[in-house]
Image (spheres, grey):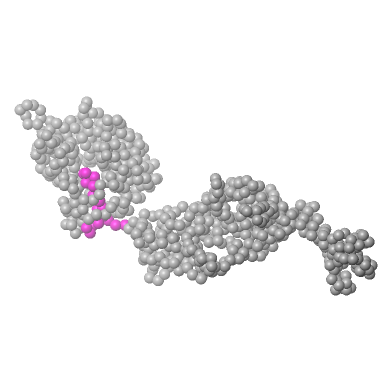
Amino acid sequence: MLIDGHGNWGSMDDDPAAAMRYTEARLSPIAMELLRDIEKRTVQFKDNFDNSTKEPVVLPSRYPNLLVNGVSGISSGFATEIPTHNLREIIDACVALIANPDMTVAELMSIVKGPDFPTGGLIMGEDGIREAYETGKGRIYIRAKTAIEDVRGGKQQIIITEVPYQVVKSRLVNAIDNIRMEKKVEGIAEVRDESGRNGLRIVIELKKDVDADGILAYLLKKTDLQVAYNFNMVAIVKKAPRQLGIKAMMEAYIEHQKEVVTFRTRYDLEKAEDRAHVLEGLVKALNVLDEVIETIKASKNRLDAQANLMAKFQFSERQADAILTLQLYRLTNLEITQLEKEHGETMKKIAQLRAILENPRKLMNVIKDELAEIREKYGIDRRSVIQGEVEEIKVNLEVTVPAEEVIVTISREGYVKRTSLLSFTRSGGEIESAGVKEGDVIRWNLTLNTLDPIFIFTQKGQYFLLPVHQIPEFKWKDTGTAIVNLLPLAKDDKIVGVVTAKPGELAPQSAGNSGTDNQPVLVFVTKRGQVKRTALAEYATSRSMAIAACKVSEGDEIIKVFRSDTPEDLLLITEQGMSIRFNLGEVNLQGRVAGGVRGIVLKEKDRLADAVTVSGDEGEVLVLSDLGYAKRTLLLDYPQQSRAGKGIQTFEFKEGKRVRSNGARLIAGFYVKEAVTLLTITAGGSVSEFSSEAAPIDDRRGQGKSMTSVDRGDLLTEAFKKPMMSS
């Protein structure tokens, strides 16, 4: 501290200082070292702002204050940020550099470990320190000193005893308390500031059975418990700003001290030579005292006496003046001896001063000795701890999000909501009671954990990762929020697939597997019959924007995305009633942005209507036309073929003027083993449903039976299984 203050001078809580009438200030002892010898012409002086007095251009600064106390400032076009350092380390480094001017920065860093902040803390980033000491620019991280203590009742608490440099303690405490009140972290019971005469102490009391390390990691990441500090060591050297490394800064300081000590020595030499000259005159006068007295008595006045002494005894004007001002008690034998002794000591001092000026080594020894004296008198132990590596802060999702089983629904028109199981149960526990807009229906119904992610895939080949905990919570009978409020989904795009996953399934190591170990895989199917398989792990992301999921050719679009964890067959169904069944193993795993391979050779103007996974020989394949005609065919009738063939017929359309049409195209296909309810939707938005059991079992070329009345001007456009209460 350069100023010794008395009264209220503010605090770490950013409290303002009292008015100046209530405070006092004086320079501290170490501040006087900055001014020491200023009266001995050690530094240049210039006129002050109004030419009424002189002021020093620089201070003698008998220790490297620029590094010890640091500085933060800005001027026109230049800014500087120099951290504080330990006085002992800086002086030791200066002394070592004087002894060996060829020292490297690495050698200096064996003495100066890094900055040393008055507030202590943990400094991380040895590489940043080295870069700053070499170039003048670098970055480090300062972390608060924390500890986790066990308290009664099986609880824990986080204790903070040191905060990063220049962090306002009250704001830090408020920030942590706001996190508690806003429940951004589950598990903080209370935040207290117990700082007092015994030092800084912030207590974060935790609830029982919570992850104390996880909460601490979150606080380090989200509050000023850890801050970045950027070096920008700019200083004025020879009247010009320069960006300096630590060695260049110390060399500049040593050069400055050489000037200071040289000027001071010259000043002291002048004074000593003047005193020696006076003493020589006094000693000479005392040897002829009687004659001197006679000469003075015979003089008319003081000026005459001075002239007579100079003429008769060859005294200089300075010596004659000293003789005339000599007091009578100085004529005693003791005083004569003292004068002779003082003369001898003065001559010895003159010899020493001249030796310093003539010998650069002695000059440097003087600088080293005086620095060592200051080190001994004012040095304190290091307060900040240096850690070489910057420790990465990893915040577990479990810390910020309480694990809870919830229901997530997404409607056909794109309304999404998260509902607690309690709200679902209280509302009757049925899918029919879910709140939706008029004419809308629930398209996806998923039972998930709040820690799970959801993948949303669109027909244009993009996807979004939506964490369940980010979906707003609503009651079961509420409509929810439009998904465009959560995701930047384009207006001309729509959702075609929703896939769930567990956080552990997105581990990067899974991405490089061969696909033979039942790893989770995503399957993409497009309108033009392209099929792609990609490992689910390749879709892991932390971004919230749209990301490419699959390359889609011009004029094509994705019609289905689903997850396939085990080897199974894929059945492709076209609008004109063709189908092909092949094993998914024929589709090699590709990268995330690949476009896939051909699954079926389509006739002209034919397009894919649906794709379903099948396995074994049990069950039936149900197909549905745009006029609501459906039929079931045994899976046995669909033999496994090779990929990229023309396929076999799965539905026959009625044609003719007198024949009642059963539709112009297929819109959907389903693999059914037991009765399911199917929802159908027309172009105008009319919704109806029927049971799969109502559809007749027929051969592949069957013409189906009408399952729902459809107006020829409002044909069916889509159909899907009615969501059930399971994931």
Does residue 671 appear in this view? yes
Q: Compared to 261, does 722 lie above or below?
A: above
Residue 347 position in % (x across, y down)? 84, 61
- Tell me, yes or no, if residue 650 can be seen here: no
In the current view of this chain or complex, which residue is farthest to the left?
658
Q: Is residue 420 magenta?
A: yes
Residue at 14 percent of width and 36 percent of height: 715
Q: Tell me: 350 left or right of 631.
A: right
Residue drawn at the location 69% of the way across and 48% of the way down: 102
| Drawn side of residue 156 relative to residue 111, left or right | left
Position of residue 517 measured from the top left corner of the image (x, y, whole percent)? 34, 44
Q: Position of residue 426 (x, y in %)?
A: 19, 59
The answer to which image quadrant residue 710 occupies is top left
Q: In the orientation shown, which residue stands out farthest toward the front?
A: 300
In which image quadrant can residue 278 be found? bottom right
Question: What is the magenta segment's predominant secondary structure?
Answer: strand
Can you give x and y, in whole percent of width and height, for residue 713 in the image?
Answer: 11, 34
- Residue 419 magenta: yes
Identify the residue at horizontal 47%, vertical 60% (top origin): 168
Q: Is residue 589 above or below residue 165?
A: above
- Quadrant in which residue 204 is drawn: bottom left
Q: Quadrant of the N terminus?
A: bottom right
Range drawn in magenta: 403-423
In the image, 11 versus 151, the foreground residue is 11
Residue 350 versus residue 330 in the image, above or below? above
Q: Residue at x 60, y 62 (%)?
A: 2
- 7 or 655, which is in the foreground? 7
In-front residue for pair 362/715: 362
